Image (cartoon, grey):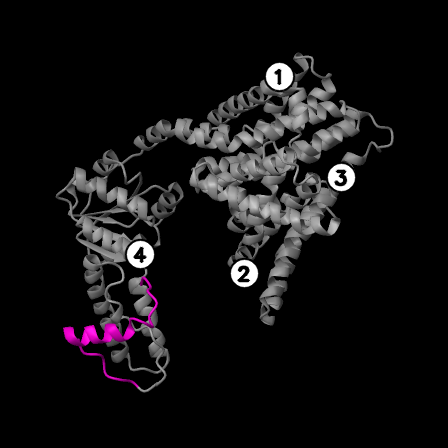
């Protein structure tokens, strides 16, 4: 294969592998991360379709960089300050304790000398930022307690790479390295971080304001990529991780008015490069090394992960985490990390242990990464009972009101204002701990709990409520709640938020007393305001909105009986060329409806509105 052919064939192979693996493994419920890993192993070590995994790995690290930039955008400096105890306390304890214990085990087993054992132990103490954060994001756990603590530990691990690389220099006793290099590197790191903070505060927002005035979207995208990659390159130049620079850049822009646009611009690149990163990890697995040292690796991988998980669990419990949160953190961070590759390669080049030992350690880290998605699935199932115990400990003292509202996202928050203004008491339960804490600060009677569980609903006062308002934003969750309420509390009246038109029809078939599509009324109001903005009389615009609402209700009733395609003739689906107002359409008799439907049958495309 020529170099020109490889330029096109390899990207095609990687893209095809990513698409197929992500689809199959997502369908199996195993997550996309494991799919990318398997695709990389098949494309690389097994079929040898792509042999230059190192270059791909170097490029794909941009996925981790973009991921941390987006996380920085979603955080704020004030929140990082609130997490300082977990970062400097729990994070530091995890690296020191885990690294020391793993180093002692390696030395006691007689695998390498004490200097090599220190490097190996602390290298294995680091976890994979990419794997852990991607799994947290996929599971929607970034803002949970165990998600915050996992992120704090990972953040300190990124900081720890600088002193660990310095440790390699000290242990190697290389005469060509100045003794004051560690101090100068530390000073350079501090200066670089300070410069990043100042640039983010005084330069980035004005720069994006100037670029936004040009109206060129491609320039805004280029500027976003420039900021992220530039910040990563600066941090790497002073010995810090690229991800640390991207995180700082995101934090500096987290309060900018351009935050959402930047996130939308970077998100496609993050997803693509992160998928490439996971595939590169799979491709970098040296099958021949695993085969030659199969017994050692089969012992080392589970032993390392077990010791690491046990130590992290104990440290989290000491730090005050629940059994559930401690278990999730321990199993999530039990793998080795990508920084271990850098540390082991540097140590081998410095003569602290042979290259063969570095290759074995890299294989151990890679296999532990490959096991992480499966471990995450297992952890969710094994800790489900503990999660239930945590929820049962929630205090429902004072619960019970006229209305029990389940779900307090944007829809529920707006609806609650109407109820409270109408003088009705409302008890709210929600499964998001962060949302509960935030709402409680504003004085809402809100409790943490899972609305799909009978005991939680009883504790929240469903037996005393006049009505239950199901305001959850996921269709499948809403259906489970309604099915359970109708089964266990058949006399309770249910009002529900529906996801779309099909969901509304399903809810009506279930016998829900009232349902409302989450976007119906806002869409009607928005269209009405547009008409008024085009100088139409307000009363006429209101009458048109009322007519559309009535048509929509009539279509729903027809569709519930005849199927989704029924009632198409009621839609205003053709462009109006005349601007002069016309009188509202009068209701048609059955003959007129049939005639109009026949006229439209050949030209109209079926839609679900």
Relative to 224, say whether 123 is above or below: above
Residue 592 lies in the magenta stretch: yes
Q: Which of the marked residues, 2 or 4, is nearer the chain's N terminus?
A: 2
Start-end of magenta stretch: 581-609
Quadrant for the C terminus in the image:
bottom left
Label 2 neighbourhood size at 10 Å, few (<14), some (14-19), many (20+)?
some
Position of 439 with respect to 555 (left or right) is right
SS assignment at label 3? helix
Residue denoted by label 1: 295
Which dot marks residue 185? 3
Give the image location of residue 181, x and y in percent. Answer: 80, 35
Q: Nearer the viewer, mark 3 or mark 1?
A: 1
Is residue 69 at least partly visible in the picture?
no
Is residue 294 at least partly visible in the picture?
yes
Label 1 neighbourhood size at 10 Å, few (<14), some (14-19), many (20+)?
few
Residue denoted by label 2: 258
Cβ atoms under marks 2 and 4 closer than 8 Å: no
| Quarter of the rendering containing residue 220 | bottom right
Give the image location of residue 135, x and y in percent. Answer: 49, 38
SS assignment at label 2? loop
From the viewer's side, name the closer residue of 35 and 209. 35
Which dot marks residue 172? none
Which dot marks residue 500? 4
Q: CA distance from mark 4 to mark 1?
A: 55 Å
- Chief secondary structure of the magenta span? loop
Q: Which of the marked residues, 4 or 1, is nearer the chain's N terminus?
A: 1
From the viewer's side, name the closer residue of 438 and 338. 338
The residue sitting at the left extreme is 491
SS assignment at label 1? helix
Q: CA distance from mark 2 to mark 3?
A: 34 Å
Q: Which of the marked residues, 1 or 2, is nearer the chain's N terminus?
A: 2
């Amino acid at each position: 294969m020529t170099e020109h052919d490889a330029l096109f064939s390899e990207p095609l192979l990687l893209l095809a592998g990513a698409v197929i693996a992500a689809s199959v493994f997502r369908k199996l419920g195993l997550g996309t991360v494991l799919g990318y890993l398997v695709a990389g192993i098949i494309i690389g070590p097994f079929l040898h379709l792509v042999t230059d995994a190192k270059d791909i790995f170097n490029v794909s690290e941009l996925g981790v960089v973009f991921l941390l930039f987006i996380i920085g955008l979603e955080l704020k400096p004030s929140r990082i300050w609130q997490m300082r105890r977990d970062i400097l306390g729990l994070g530091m304890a995890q690296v020191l304790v885990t690294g020391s214990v793993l180093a002692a085990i390696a030395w006691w087993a007689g695998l390498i000398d004490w200097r090599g054992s220190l490097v190996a132990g602390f290298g294995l103490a680091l976890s994979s930022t990419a794997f852990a954060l991607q799994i947290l994001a996929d599971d929607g756990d970034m803002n949970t307690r165990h998600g915050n603590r996992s992120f704090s530990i990972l953040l300190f691990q990124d900081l720890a790479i600088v002193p660990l690389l310095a440790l390699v220099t000290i242990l190697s006793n290389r005469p060509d390295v100045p003794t004051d290099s560690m101090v100068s590197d530390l000073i350079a790191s501090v200066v670089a971080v300070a410069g990043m903070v100042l640039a983010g505060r005084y330069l980035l927002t004005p720069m994006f304001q100037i670029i936004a005035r040009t109206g060129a979207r491609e320039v805004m995208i280029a500027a976003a990529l420039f900021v992220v990659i530039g910040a990563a390159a600066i941090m790497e130049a002073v010995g810090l991780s690229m991800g640390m620079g991207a995180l700082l850049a995101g934090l500096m822009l987290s309060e900018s008015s351009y935050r959402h646009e930047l996130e939308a611009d970077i998100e496609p690149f993050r997803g693509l490069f992160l998928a490439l990163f996971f595939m590169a990890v799979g491709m970098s697995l040296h099958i021949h090394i695993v085969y030659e040292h199969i017994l050692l690796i089969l012992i080392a991988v589970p032993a390392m992960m077990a010791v690491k998980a046990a130590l992290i669990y104990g440290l989290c419990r000491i730090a005050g985490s629940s059994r559930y949160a401690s278990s999730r953190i321990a199993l999530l961070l039990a793998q080795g990390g990508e920084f271990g590759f850098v540390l082991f390669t540097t140590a081998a080049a410095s003569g602290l242990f042979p290259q063969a030992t570095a290759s074995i350690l890299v294989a151990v880290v890679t296999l532990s990464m490959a096991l992480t998605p499966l471990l995450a699935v297992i952890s969710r199932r094994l800790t489900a009972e503990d999660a239930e115990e945590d929820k049962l400990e929630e205090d429902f003292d004072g619960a019970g009101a006229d209305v029990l509202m389940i779900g307090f996202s944007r829809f529920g928050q707006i609806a609650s204002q109407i109820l409270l203004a109408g003088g009705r008491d409302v008890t709210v339960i929600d499964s998001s701990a962060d949302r509960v804490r935030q709402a409680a600060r504003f004085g809402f009677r809100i409790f943490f709990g899972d609305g799909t569980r009978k005991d939680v609903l009883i504790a929240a006062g469903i037996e005393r409520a006049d009505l239950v308002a199901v305001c959850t934003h996921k269709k499948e969750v809403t259906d489970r709640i309604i099915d359970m309420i109708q089964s266990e509390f058949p006399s309770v009246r249910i009002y529900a938020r529906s996801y779309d038109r099909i969901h509304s029809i399903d809810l009506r078939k279930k016998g829900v007393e009232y349902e409302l599509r989450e976007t119906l009324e806002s869409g009607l109001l928005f269209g009405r305001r547009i008409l008024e903005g085009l100088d139409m009389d307000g009363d006429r615009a209101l009458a048109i909105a009322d007519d559309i609402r009535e048509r929509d209700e009539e279509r729903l009733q027809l569709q519930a009986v005849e199927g989704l395609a029924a009632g198409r003739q009621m839609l205003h689906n053709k462009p109006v060329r005349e601007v002069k107002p016309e009188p509202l359409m009068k209701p048609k008799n059955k003959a007129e409806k049939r005639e109009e439907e026949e006229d439209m049958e050949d030209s109209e495309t079926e839609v679900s509105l």
